[in-house]
Amino acid sequence: MVHKAGSGHPGGSLSAIDLIVGLYGTEFRFRKDDPNWEDRDRFIMSKGHASPAVYSMLHNLGILTKEDIDGFRTLGSTCQGHVDMKWTDGVDFSAGSLGMGLSFGLGCAIAAKMDNSDRNIWVMIGDGETQEGQIWEAAMAADFHQTGNLNVIIDRNRIQNDDFMEVQMEIGDIGKKFESFGWKIIEIDGHNMTEVINAIRVATNEKNIPCAIVAHTVKGKGVSFMENNPSFHGKAPNDEELKLALEELS
Amino acid sequence: MSAPSTGGASRDGYGSALLKLAKDPRVVVLEADLGKSTKSCLFRAEYPERTVSMGIAEQNMMLVSAGMASSGKIPFASTFAIFTERAFEQVRNGIARPGLVVHICGSHGGIHTGTDGSSAQSIEDLAIYRTIPNMTVMHPCDDLSAEELTIQLLNHDKPSYTRTARNKVPRIYNEETVKQIKIGKGNIISHGNDVAILACGVMVNEAKLAANELSENGVNVCVVDMHTIKPLDGKLIEELAKKCGCIVTAEDHSVIGGLGGSVAEFLSKNIPIPLEMVGVDDRFGESGGTSELMSELDINSDSIVNAVNRVIKRKLQP
C-alpha cells in the first residue's frame, strides 16, 4: 500500500499492527456489515499516520475492498493519507494532527455514559504524541469524569519523525505519568500476543477508571531494515526493499 | 422599528437560549471555567448532568465536543472569544474538517470587554473562523437576537462560531421583531437610500446612533444588522449596493478579515462601489472604559458618521 502510493508511514504502522489485531480479534464490539452501528465500540486512531495498519485491518475484515486500499493517498480515494471518518466506513476519527484523539475519545466516552451505553472507547496514541500538551489535558479530564469506559493504547516505539525520542524529547515513564493522573496502567510487550490480549481484557473489564496500556513495541517490526530505524517513519520502501520486506513478513 | 428602553448583553441571550434548547435531550453544554461569564452557568444550574466541565483546557474542550457530536449529541461549547482562538487548529481539524456539528460560543468578543486589557480583547476571531470551510460565523447585536440565533442553531447542520459581547447595549429588537431574523440573512433595521451601514454586534447600536445624527443633516441611511458574517448575505449586499451606491461596515473587530473584509471581497468581485470600513485598524487594544476605548480606537458612532461622509463624497466624486 505504502510502496504503491510512494509515500506513507510504514514504521509506526508495523509497530501498531499487533495491537490493532489483538483488539479487533478479541474484545472490540462492532458489526462488519454495519460499520456505523451507533452502539459499536469506538477505535480512535490518534496516530493517524499509521493509517496503513488501520486500512489493512478493515480490509481483512471485509469493510474495505482491495480497490479501496490500492487507492491509498490518491485523489478521491476512500483511504486518505491519514485516517478520516468522513471518508472511510469503520474509521471513527479524523486524525492527522497529533494530540487530539484522546480528547475525542473522552468525548465519546462521556457521551456513552450519558446514554447509559456499555460501549467501550479505545484510543491509540504514539509515544511521541504524548509530547503534545493536549494529551495531558485529556488525561486529567478522563480521571475527573471517571470514564471507566475509556482505554488508551500507547504505541511505545521510542522513535518519532525526526529521530529517536531520547534525542528529540524523551517523555520518561509514560505509565507513571498516566498513573499520577488517576489511570490504571498495564505495561506489556506490544508484540507478545498473549500479553496484548490479556491487557485488552483487563482494560475492558475495568469499568471504574480509565486504563492505559503502555505497549513496548519496535518501530518497523518484522522488517529487519526498518526495525528501530527512524528513517522509515515516513518513507515508502523502494521496489527492492518491498520485495525483501514481503519475504521477511511472510 | 422602535427599540425598547431596556438593554441586554448578547451573552445573556446565549445563556437563556441554552435553557430553551434543553428540552432536546441531545443538547449538551461544555464550559472551560468561565460559565459564569459566558452564561452557560444558567444551563449548568438546571441540567448539571448534561453540563461537562473541562477546566481551563480549551483544546481538550473542542475535541471532547467533537467526540460527543460524533456520538449523537449537539454540543454547545463556550469560553471567552480570545481563548477559543487558542484552540483554532482543534476547531479546524477536529470539528470542521470531519463536519461535526459543534456550536462554539466565544463571549467577551472585541474591545468592548474593556478594562481587562488587550489580552482579553479578541479582535480577530471572526476573521479566523471565517476561513474554515463550512463554518457558520455569527455576531449578534443584543440579547434577544443572540437568543433567537442560538435557538436556530439546534437545526443547523454545520459547525458554528458565535461571538457574544460582555456589556449590555440598548436592545435593537423586541420580542416580535426578533422573530424575523434568520441565520445567514442580514436584517434591515432602518431604511434609507444614500448609504447602507452594515454592522454587527455592539456596533449595530452605534450605527443607529450615527444614522439618527446623519438624518438630521438630510442623509438617509439604511442600517443593517449583519449578524451572520458567514455565509455572507450577498443577495442583500448586492441589492443595497445598487440602491445606495456606497457602503460602510462597522464592527468591534479588526478591519482585516472580519465583516469589513468579507464585504470588501464580495463587492470587489461582484459590484465594485465605494466602501469604508469602521473597525480596529490593525492594532491591539488596551485597558480602559468601554466608551473611552471605542473613541480611542475610532470605532464609535462618530467614526461611523465620518466614514459615511467620506464614502458619500467618494460616491459623488468618483
Image: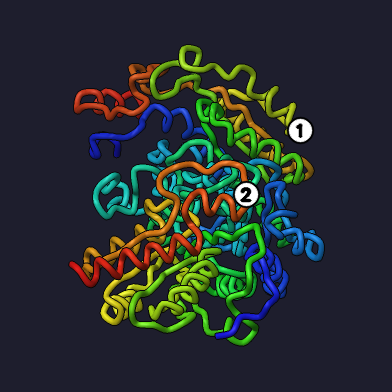
B258 vs B3, nearest the viewer: B3
Specify the quadrant that holds the N terminus of chain B. Answer: bottom right
In the rendered view, tell whether residue B4 sits above or below residue A63. Answer: below
Specify the quadrant that holds the C terminus of chain B. Answer: bottom left
Q: Chain of mark 2?
A: B
Q: Which residue is mark 1?
A: A182
Q: What's the residue at 30%, 78% (across, down)?
A: B244
Q: Position of residue B91 (x, y in %)?
A: 49, 50
| Cα distance between the residues tagged 2 and 1 | 40 Å
A142 vs A186, nearest the viewer: A142
- Residue B67 visible: no
Q: What's the residue at 29%, 39% (across, down)?
A: A1
Q: Position of residue B102 (x, y in %)?
A: 55, 60
Instruction: Kindly identify the amino acid type of the residue bearing the numbered disc 1.
Output: Gly
Q: Chain of mark 1?
A: A
Badge 1 local density, few (<14 within 10 Å), some, or many (20+)? some
Identify the mark at residue B114; answer none if there is no mark.
2
B269 vs B290, nearest the viewer: B290
Q: Position of residue B208 (x, y in %)?
A: 51, 73
Q: Position of residue B80 (x, y in %)?
A: 62, 50
In the rendered view, tell whether residue A226 sits above or below residue B198. Answer: above
- Residue B44 visible: yes
Badge 2 local density, few (<14 within 10 Å), some, or many (20+)? many
Closer to us: mark 2 or mark 1?
A: 2
Q: Secondary structure at mark 2?
A: loop
